[in-house]
Image (cartoon, grey):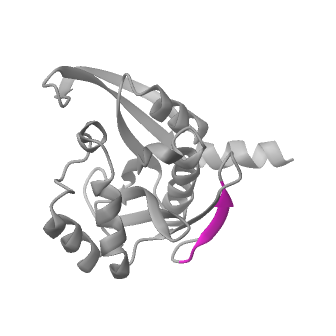
Amino acid sequence: MMFGSKESKLKDGTPVTLRPMVKEDEESLYRFFLSLSDELLMFIRHNVRDRKVVREWSQNLDYERVLPLVALVDGEIVADATLHRVPHGWKRHIGRIRVVVSPRYQNQGMATLMLNELVELGHELGLEKLWAEIPLDSVGAIRACRNAGFACKAVIEELVKNAQNQNLDILIMVCDIASYFDRRWSQKT
């Protein structure tokens, strides 16, 4: 899929298109972020309600550093995922991922669909592992990661704060890309 689009369906049959973000997605991506709750936005490292932040992302795309993936339903962005890479150093073989799904499309397989796509892209890009940080109480996100081949590796207690300023535990999940593809291959034989 590297720089094309892919058609799929959610559990309820809703058709969805996955593709890398392009400059023209700026307005739709901004509207997507505006539609999300404060609670969901708490886990995003940037103030995505600031139009300048989304404009910067969309107008200065660098797929070598960050590969943003969007999911569209009826032409509207309903989920966003990113694969972050570093070009050198001791983590050059690891991709860090982030996925945000509109509540309307949660529990429909959207996160798993996007995570599977990120794993495939990581494989195409020559990465060995994908890394995700998830609040320990986010059962749906943990399930989606497990469905996409991620395993729990560590819990860091009280590392981050939620919108109510309470400390939260973070679960580190890692996908070993080679094992993911080995498992998929063995299921098809």
> Which residue is found at the position 33% from the left and 53% from the top?
35
> Which residue is found at the position 24% from the left and 40% from the top?
38
Q: Does 33 sit above or below residue 54? A: above
Q: Position of residue 129 (x, y in %)?
A: 45, 47
Quadrant containing the N terminus is bottom right
Numbered range of the magenta stretch: 4-9
Q: Position of residue 174 (x, y in %)?
A: 44, 38
Observer-nearest of 95 and 18:
18
Answer with left or right where residue 94 lies relative to residue 157. Answer: right
Q: Does 68 sit above or below residue 43? A: below
Q: Position of residue 113 (x, y in %)?
A: 58, 51
Q: Position of residue 10 (x, y in %)?
A: 65, 51
> Which residue is found at the position 67% from the left and 61% from the top?
8
Answer with left or right where residue 10 lies relative to residue 78. Answer: right
Is residue 85 inside the magenta stretch? no
Q: Does 73 sit above or below residue 148? A: below
